[in-house]
Amino acid sequence: MDLTELSLEPVEPRKGEQSDSNEPVNHLNVAAIRDFEQSNRGATEEGTDQTIEDISQANLQTKKDLAGLSPVLRFYKGDNIQGRTLEEILEWSDSKLEYTHDFIQMLFPIPERSNFMLHPAATLDEQTIETFRNDPELQTSMRMALARMLRFFGFDYQIVSLDPGTEGATASQRLVQIVPNPETFPRAARNWMNSHNDLRITRIIRCLRCCGMETEAREFYRALRHLHTSRTGHPRRISDRTFMYWTRAAKRDLRIPPDMSDAEAERFGGT
């Protein structure tokens, strides 16, 4: 099952928005909006008024439910955080993802603060991490974000099996494949390799692990390791220093950030 095919479909770019040549903008369908439109099709004026009242009450309750959550959880549950929603970011073109620098912190939050902070509290605290690890819907939304960024990097992302009954497999043991797309990867790699996207990748791997998505983090790291060691099939070289940070994000104890030196990490209790 291809997650990107299930979650995303091409639409025309919005007026005035920069778009890459021949590149469709991704659009995430929102089931609630579709259901609302279908439920009101052919409704009487009285019925429509009642439905609007019901929707208003539901929206009020939703706001109350979101009020006590961290900004990260509110964002991943569909709330607008400082002018952006998850749905809107998933629609952005590759160009907008490349040249906008303050969205990745909310899309893939980590415990450490960032200088480019969309929201001052857009970090992973212990409660937010625990909620993500125990909420399949939140993880599904993060997989949509991962699918979009992987397409930006030129990778294909497929979930091969979601059957939890196969040889006693659990959700964390499902089969995931992340591989370069032979048609789109060379062009994409010319844009993102050896740039600020190195830091984005470190962040993505760390975030996935913190949020209980070790399978995706491990598979993404495996694909990157292959690029680093093969040094073929892409136009630029991944530096050893960059790969070191990716390795730290993928393998270190989660209490130890990737930018902590090995000497400091040893004093902290691990590497």
Image: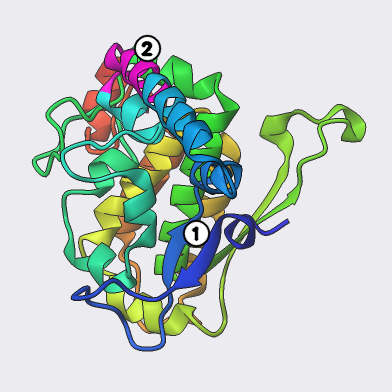
- Residue 2 x, y percent position in the rendering: 67, 59
For residue 225, which numbered disc appears in the image?
A: 1
Marks 2 and 1, the one that precedes in the sequence: 2
Does the magenta-highlighted stretch encompass residue 62? yes
Residue type of the residue flagged with mark 2:
Gln
SS at badge 1: helix
Q: Is residue 68 rendered to the left or right of residue 150?
A: left
Which label lies toward us, 2 or 1? 2
- Residue 79 x, y percent position in the rendering: 32, 33
Say which quarter of the image contains residue 136: top right
Q: Which residue corresponds to mark 2? A: 127
> Which residue of the protein is positioned furthest toward the left in this rendering?
115
Q: Nearer the viewer, residue 3 or 87?
A: 87
Could you tell me which residue is drawn at 32 percent across and 60 percent down?
Answer: 240
Q: Is residue 241 visible?
A: no
* 162 in relation to 21, above or below: above
Could you tell me which residue is drawn at 47 percent across and 41 percent down?
Answer: 142
* 268 in relation to 29, above or below: above
The Cα–Cα distance between marks 2 and 1, rounded to whole angstroms, is: 32 Å
Does the magenta-highlighted stretch encompass residue 36? no
SS at badge 2: helix
- Residue 63 x, y percent position in the rendering: 32, 20
Q: Is residue 44 rendered to the left or right of residue 228?
A: right
Q: Main secondary structure of the magenta part?
A: helix
- First to last magenta residue range: 58-70
For residue 20, which numbered disc appears in the image?
A: none
Q: Nearer the viewer, residue 223 or 97?
A: 97
Mark 2 closeness class: few <14, some 14–19, many ≥20 residues within 10 Å: few
Residue type of the residue flagged with mark 1:
Arg
